[in-house]
Image: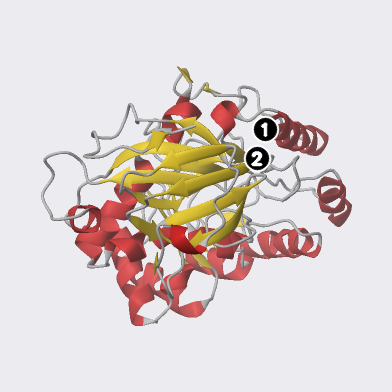
């Protein structure tokens, strides 16, 4: 190891969640990270733990890839004018989330809707979250809400400027299938991922987006398939699951019954790998710092999914569907972790049993890029055990 490299050793891990549906629990009790990347996973006796810059004793707790929120609406910094709330991103970190993905900065007061203005704001949003990471959290932002009148050159310009996401289609003037399809194809051509509003209007200015529009638009992500807030009828949700292969995004600020319907349909299709999770906040429902953990517990307990599989929905599935370098316990991926243990006095004989009964775990620490960002969570119930920084 080069003397300039920074080495983190995490030992005495009780359980390693991988984020991978094919193997959700990994063998091992130790993880080595170098320069903010995972370098080795296994048993301490088999790994080179010499000369670390920092050692963390996991004290037998579970470690998972940092959770990913696939659907947020940031504005600027760690502030949301929608709820007049400061430090919502830091609160979300205390819920184990280390990466946030914008579905459009729609709550910016005076949000420009002309083409020059919307491009300028998207580029600015991409820049300010690239340059400033609240509490170390990775905020993938700069997601323009498309409007009528945009041409292919606009998407090329956005891509060249570093914009890699579209805001959810349907929040702007584009609400018809043919126009959405054309713009999604332009976006895809230039490496920009797309998502679409699904269901009834969420706020004044948005509109109904039904299955026919969703299928014709063919976005990379079917945004809040369980509604944000109002879900489509059951037959339309089933049709969306059966008629395409795009990501099925289930959100906290949606219809819980529709969420379970989506999960059950995906399972019947043997396509659980399409399920990803978001909160769809900040929004009219407020801020949900524990939203991803709550969705994991909901889908496990009401959807009859093993908890270790449900955790994949909020980590590795999102990573793979969105082509990220976070969310998986794999050598070369970012060293972004959440340490969790069974909440004190919760039922069940282990963290997984407790979550499968609908209970939240206690978060004891988060790490982003190999750096400790938070310790005992101020928002989750207290964990039975906590990791410790030894050096």
For image coordinates 50% across by 54% down, the residue present is: 31
Q: Which mark is residue 129?
A: 1
Q: Secondary structure at mark 2?
A: loop
Q: Is residue 148 left or right of residue 36?
A: right
Crowd class of label 2 (few under 14; some 14 to 19; many from 20; radius 10 Å): many
Q: Position of residue 363 (x, y in %)?
A: 34, 39
Q: Quadrant of residue 237?
A: bottom left
Q: Secondary structure at mark 1?
A: helix
Towards the viewer: 377 or 53 = 53
Could one spot residue 256 in this view of the protein? no
For image coordinates 61% across by 22% down, the residue present is: 109
Q: Earlier in the sequence, mark 1 or mark 2?
A: 1
Towards the viewer: 217 or 144 = 144
Determine which residue is flagged by label 2: 141
Towards the viewer: 83 or 335 = 335
Q: Height in image: 68 above or below 118?
A: below
Q: Position of residue 309 (x, y in %)?
A: 35, 66
Label 1 vs label 2: CA separation? Answer: 7 Å
Crowd class of label 1 (few under 14; some 14 to 19; many from 20; radius 10 Å): many
């Amino acid at each position: 190891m080069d003397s300039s490299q920074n080495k983190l050793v995490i030992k005495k891990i009780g359980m390693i969640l991988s984020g991978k549906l094919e193997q959700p629990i990994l063998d091992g009790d130790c993880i080595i990270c170098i320069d903010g990347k995972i370098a080795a996973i296994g048993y301490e006796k088999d790994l080179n733990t010499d000369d670390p810059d920092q050692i963390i004793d996991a004290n037998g707790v579970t470690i998972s890839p940092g959770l990913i929120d696939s659907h947020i609406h940031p504005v600027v910094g760690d502030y949301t004018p929608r709820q007049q709330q400061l430090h919502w991103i830091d609160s979300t970190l205390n819920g184990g989330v280390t990466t946030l993905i914008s579905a459009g900065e729609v709550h910016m007061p005076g949000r420009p809707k002309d083409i020059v203005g919307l491009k300028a704001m998207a580029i600015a949003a991409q820049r300010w979250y690239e340059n400033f990471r609240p509490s170390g959290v990775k905020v993938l932002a700069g997601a323009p809400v498309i409007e009528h009148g945009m041409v292919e050159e606009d998407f090329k310009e956005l891509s060249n400027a570093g914009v890699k996401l579209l805001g959810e289609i349907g929040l702007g003037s584009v609400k018809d299938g043919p126009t959405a399809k054309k713009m999604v194809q332009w976006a895809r051509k230039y490496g920009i991922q797309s998502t679409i509003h699904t269901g009834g209007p969420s706020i004044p200015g948005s509109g109904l987006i039904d299955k026919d529009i969703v299928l014709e638009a063919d976005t990379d992500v079917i945004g809040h398939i369980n509604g944000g807030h109002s879900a489509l009828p059951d037959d339309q949700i089933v049709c969306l699951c059966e008629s395409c292969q795009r990501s099925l995004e289930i959100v906290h600020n949606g219809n819980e019954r529709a969420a379970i319907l989506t999960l059950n349909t995906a399972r019947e299709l043997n396509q659980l790998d399409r399920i990803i999770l978001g909160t769809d906040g900040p929004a009219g429902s407020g801020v949900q710092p524990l939203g991803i953990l709550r969705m994991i517990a909901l889908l496990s307990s009401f959807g009859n999914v093993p908890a270790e599989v449900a955790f994949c929905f909020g980590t590795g599935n999102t990573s793979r569907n969105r082509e990220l370098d976070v969310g998986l316990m794999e050598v070369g991926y970012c060293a972004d972790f959440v340490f969790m243990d069974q909440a004190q006095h919760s039922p069940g004989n282990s963290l997984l049993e407790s979550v499968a009964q609908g209970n939240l775990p206690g978060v004891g620490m988060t790490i982003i890029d190999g750096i400790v960002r938070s310790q005992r969570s101020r928002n989750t119930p207290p964990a039975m055990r906590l990791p410790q920084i030894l050096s």
